[in-house]
Amino acid sequence: MVHSTTSFEVQLAIAVIKTLILLVGGVVTYLAFSAYRRTDDRSLGLLAVGFGLIVVGVLLAGFTFEVLNISLGVGILIESLFAFFGLSTIAYSLRVR
């Protein structure tokens, strides 16, 4: 079953939640990067990159849907790819010695 339309309320809720994710994710990325710069610990640098990828994915998903008028499904696919690579980087950062 494919849904081609969403109500204004759902679009607004998505925009609000994505904005909050962008803000909080940006803070987490900044804190991880600051910790990396203080300690020069490679795992913290990778952690910052992983969170950064997730935040960029959220940004691109909203941008493609709202600004470029590309379907919501494509935006979700883009976000999912960035989330996958971001989480993979975070998982790797936890294994680095």
Image (tube, rainbow, N blue to C red):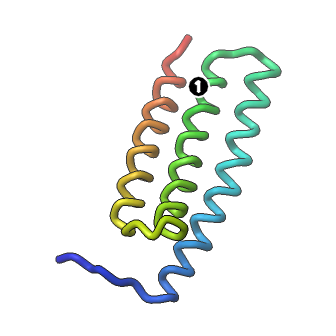
User: In the drawing, does residue 24 fall left or right of residue 79?
Assistant: right
Q: Secondary structure at mark 1?
A: helix
13, above or below 43, in the image: below
Kindly give the residue lying farthest to the left in the view shown. Answer: 1
Residue 37: x, y in percent? Answer: 79, 22
Residue at which label 1 appears = 46
Q: Residue at x 54, y 61 (%)?
A: 63
Looking at the picture, tell me which residue is in the foreground, 41 or 74: 74
Q: How many marks?
A: 1
Q: Quadrant of the C terminus?
A: top right
1, above or below 52, in the image: below
Looking at the picture, tell me which residue is in the foreground, 50 or 71: 71
Q: Quadrant of the N terminus?
A: bottom left
Residue 59: x, y in percent? Answer: 57, 55
Q: Residue at x 21, y 76 (%)?
A: 2
78, above or below 92, in the image: below
Kindly give the residue lying farthest to the front in the view shown. Answer: 68
Kindly give the residue lying farthest to the top in the view shown. Answer: 97
Q: Residue at x 35, y 83 (%)?
A: 5
User: In the drawing, does residue 79 fall left or right of residue 44?
Assistant: left
Looking at the picture, tell me which residue is in the foreground, 96 or 30: 30
Residue 13: x, y in percent? Answer: 55, 79
Residue 19: x, y in percent? Answer: 64, 65
- Going by the numbered disc 1, the residue's amino acid type is Leu
User: In the drawing, does residue 12 fall left or right of residue 10?
Assistant: right
Count residues near mark 1 (Cα–Cα under 10 Å), then give few for <14, some for 14-19, many for 20+: many
Q: Residue at x 82, y 21 (%)?
A: 38
User: In the drawing, does residue 65 fall left or right of residue 13?
Assistant: left
